[in-house]
Image (cartoon, rainbow, N blue to C red):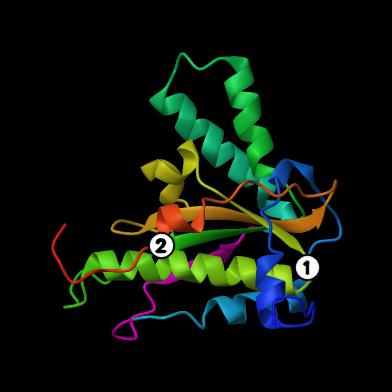
């Protein structure tokens, strides 16, 4: 089945992450991005809590996002060098499309927060698979900004956390496959005994 290029498994086997800094237009238009996000919403979710959210940052908001990120960084690290600030500013302007994914756990629920966070990660992966199936490349980044409460506060509030910045566009250069872990290193059969 994997040799059939039109099969869903073959499509999944060709997914590669792209470097957001290398992505070029075209990116998904509003209709395509909406369809991609609809697929992201079809994520396993114990308790039907939908413990995640997606915030689209349009190209006209990228400068404002850069200001949020660099202001927060300067407040935390007043000694920051010019190149650090420039890199953070560039981060906000990468790729044609940007979706900020938020883990939004319902802490009052009996469903463990860990399961809700796993669901948020699965929603991000569904988004990336949908972008790939739509003919785009995606890159899921975190970095300093994802762990900053000040940056998070621009999109939500605690207990939410930024699960990642998902950049989407077209590859500006051929995508390289990276080495994957050997199956035998990551997959085993349980023998019924304790370790």
Q: Residue at x 27, y 68 (%)?
A: 190
Q: How many marks?
A: 2
* 143 sits left or right of 107 in the view: right
Circle 1 Cα neighbour tier, 10 Å, few/some/many (<14 / 14–19 / ≥20): many
SS of the residue at dot 2? loop
- Look at the picture and state if 108 lies above or below 121: below
Q: Residue at x 60, y 82 (%)?
A: 38
Image quadrant assignment for residue 159: bottom left
Residue 150 in the image: state x and y as whole percent: 41, 42
48 drawn magenta = yes
- Look at the picture and state if 8 lies above or below 26: below
Q: Are marks 2 and 1 in contact (CB under 8 Å)?
A: no
Residue 22 vs residue 72, the one in the foreground: 22
State the extent of the magenta-drawn residues as a range: 46-57
* Residue that label 2 marks: 187
Distance between the Cα atoms at labels 2 and 1?
36 Å
Residue 151 in the image: state x and y as whole percent: 46, 45
Circle 2 Cα neighbour tier, 10 Å, few/some/many (<14 / 14–19 / ≥20): few
Q: Residue at x 26, y 72 (%)?
A: 106
Residue 74 in the image: state x and y as whole percent: 48, 25
Image quadrant assignment for residue 85: top right
Viewer-nearest of labels 2 and 1? 2
- Look at the picture and state if 9 lies above or below 19: below
Residue 101 vs residue 73, the one in the foreground: 101
* Residue 66 seen in the current view: yes
* Residue that label 1 marks: 28
Residue 145 in the image: state x and y as whole percent: 48, 40
Q: Residue at x 60, y 80 (%)?
A: 39
SS of the residue at dot 1? loop
Residue lying furthest left: 194
């Amino acid at each position: 089945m994997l040799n059939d290029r039109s099969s869903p498994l073959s499509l999944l086997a060709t997914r590669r992450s792209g470097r957001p800094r290398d992505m070029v237009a075209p990116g998904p238009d509003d209709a395509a991005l909406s369809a991609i996000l609809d697929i992201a919403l079809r994520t396993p979710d114990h308790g039907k809590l939908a413990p995640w959210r997606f915030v689209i940052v349009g190209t006209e908001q990228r400068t404002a996002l850069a200001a949020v990120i660099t202001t927060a960084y300067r407040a935390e690290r007043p000694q920051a060098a010019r190149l650090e600030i420039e890199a953070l500013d560039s981060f906000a302007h990468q790729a044609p499309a940007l979706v900020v994914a938020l883990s939004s756990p319902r802490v009052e629920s009996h469903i463990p927060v860990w399961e809700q966070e796993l669901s948020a990660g699965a929603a991000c992966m569904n988004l990336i698979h949908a972008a790939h199936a739509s003919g785009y490349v995606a890159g899921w980044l975190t970095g300093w900004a994802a762990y900053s409460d000040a940056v998070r506060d621009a999109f939500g509030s605690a207990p939410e956390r930024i699960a990642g910045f998902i950049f989407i566009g077209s590859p500006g250069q051929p995508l390289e496959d990276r080495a994957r872990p050997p199956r035998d290193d990551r997959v085993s059969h349980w023998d019924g005994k304790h370790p």
